[in-house]
Amino acid sequence: MKFWEIGKRNLKEIYRNPVLLGFLLGMPVAFMLVFCAAAGGGQASPIALSIVDEDGSQTSSAFVQYLGSVEAIELNEPIYSEKSQAQEDLEDGRISFYLFIPSGFQEAKQAQQTVNLELVYKAADPMIGLQLKPIIEAVGSEFLGVAPPLNVELKVTESKIKNMAVNFYFPGIAIFGLMILISTAAEIIAGDREKGFLARMFTTPARPWDFILGYSLPFIPVLIISTLIYLGVGMGLGLTVVGNLGYAFLIFFLIGLCSIGIGMIVGSLVKSESQAGISWIFIVPMAMISGAWFTVERMPSAIKSVAGVLPFIHAIDASRAVINGSSFSAIMLDFYWLVGWAVVLFAVGIVLFRRTMVS
Amino acid sequence: MNAVQTFKLTKEFDGLVAVNGVDLEIKKGELFSLLGPNGAGKTTTIRMLCCLLKPTRGTASILGYDVVKTPFAVKNLIGVSPQDTILSERLNCRENLALIGKVHGLSSNEVERRSKELLETMGLTERSKDQVRKFSGGMKRRLSIAMALVSNPQVLFLDEPTLGLDPQARRTIWEYVAGLKGKKTILLTTHYMEEADSLSDRIGIIDEGKVVALGTSQELKTNVFKMRNMVVSTGNLTAEVIADLHNKYSRVAMTKGELKISHKDLDFKEIVDYLHSRGITVYSAALEQPTLEDVFIQITGKKLRD
């Protein structure tokens, strides 16, 4: 059990190094908080609407009040009375859009004539128009008592997933977080090579697999704790695990193993700790094309093909699926893909390590 | 069977010959020193013997096991203390010793027993539970040697074991290494001539990758310096006596009241008796011993620390 002794040594070197330990275990928490919060970890915020009430009538004031009572809308203060003032603020970037209630609003309502409202927004921000138009139409129709030609009944159903954004972003962020094990594992091996510790150990009867296992072993508790932190913080931020939490954990564990395996390979190839930083050149693009931060649907097919070969997209897809309620059979292929990658990476690591043991 | 044997051992790095056809035979229990300046090829030789470097040509064996063909058999037999004191800095003494001992296949009890013994011998028992990053250079070096010994190896490689240590720490290590003589086969590399002189059974002088002289310290000095020198401080030498000495000995020189006589089979007593018989007052007389540094200069034409 030579690998066990090497593993024990490496584990002690990690947990007696507060900076490294803090980085390894503190990073997942910071990562989750920053990403999930930034990506909509909280409730969706209402749209801030500026209004120009040129009509200034009781009816228009009541309509403005009615708009303010809609949950999806938050009224900006003050209410403009002059359109030119709002237009100036829009052009200068102080507001993003405004709703213009022209004079004659009250008369038009009373005469049951067509009421014209203007929603003015920047050309650079077209989504606002698309988002707001139906809301204002619906609210306006209700306020004015105008029956739409088609009655669409909206039925809201309670989703098991409390916050779609968190459920979408969480797997990608957690897996990107676990990818830091690539650089950390590579740095630890490269550091020991640089200091000559590995050369000293190479004069002992330990075999290449003893080293690969011995350097991987200490990362297993780190991997388990990190995954638990990710899941814990994720749930705290609103992650809803509809499916089997154990499957999600298993997928995270496997991608963590793959990351450690890649770290072993990088560590076998580079000569110094600083050279091990090269792994970031691969980590960030791999995370990007694997859908860690955004969907890969619109990516060019060549990039999608590359991502499809790598393990990360399989881990992200599979964990997203099991968290949202898919069964294990639905992620079976991804699971075997990850197992295959882990086996191949560790085998390659052993071969490369053997080559570095004698020069 | 020799404990260490090399056959035309050669290592080239990008065309640069670091070790050039070295032939060595080190007997079991012998303490053999490779003496040479920095860059002479000492560490490269040791690295090949420890299976860390593959020879470009030639080969070597440790207790009959070829270092290229059977590296793991060799690694079971050797203990190595590298030139740079390489330890696990966040582990304590016992943990460092246990790591090497257990990787060599020792049981926990055996590791415990050996560690206790070695820590006592090396004077590290009191600090055995401290992380070694807090240790002085001398303490680290002693632990490094203890790590090389914990597996009870048959062949011990000590690469510059006292490099950079203060005289007191160096002496402590010399005493310990001297105590191992006869019990272990030791190959020690050094560029401290006094270290090689005082510790070694035999010395190989290595320069530019080649072993240029081989033998015991005395043999090297005698072989290189055929003549012995004697320095006599006198009060009333006469021209007649000097002429007489010139006739009898190979070289006679007179500088600042000191008479220097060189001759192959110079007899100290005979000269002193002769001077007395001629009424010459002898204040002091001494035989000059050549050092290994002198031997090195004589052979290579340069100083050991060049």
Image (tube, helix red, strand yellow):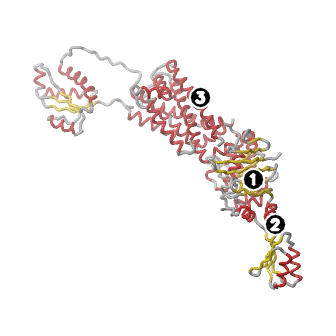
Residue A43 screen position, x and y as percent? 35, 30
The residue where tag 1 is placed is B121
Q: How many marks?
A: 3
Mark pair 3, 1: CA separation: 46 Å
Furthest toward the top, the residue is A150
Kind of residue at badge 2: Lys
Residue A235 in view: no
Q: Quadrant of the C terminus of chain A?
A: top right
Residue B259 screen position, x and y as percent? 79, 78
Residue A273 screen position, x and y as percent? 55, 45
Q: Would you identify the image quadrant in which residue A303 lies?
A: top left
Query: Helix or strand or loop: what does disc 3 sit on?
Result: helix
Residue B206 located left or right of residue A174: right
Q: Do the residues at pointers 2 and 1 share their chain?
A: yes
Which is more toward the observer, B118 or A350?
A350
Kind of residue at badge 3: Val
Mark sitting earlier along the chain (2/1): 1
The residue marked by circle 2 belongs to what chain? Answer: B
Q: Nearer the viewer, mark 3 or mark 1?
A: 3
Mark pair 3, 2: CA separation: 68 Å
Q: Would you identify the image quadrant in which residue A35 lies?
A: top left
Instruction: Give residue A343's mark.
Output: 3
Marks 3 and 2: CB-CB under 8 Å? Answer: no
Instruction: Give residue A54's mark.
Output: none
Q: Quadrant of the N terminus of chain A?
A: top right
Kind of residue at badge 1: Thr
Neighbours of disc 3 within 10 Å: few (<14), some (14-19), many (20+):
some
Query: Helix or strand or loop: what does disc 1 sit on?
Result: helix
The residue where tag 2 is placed is B226
Residue drawn at (28%, 30%), measured in percent from left and top?
A: A47
Residue A143 located left or right of residue A2: left
Q: Is residue B288 above or below residue A259?
A: below
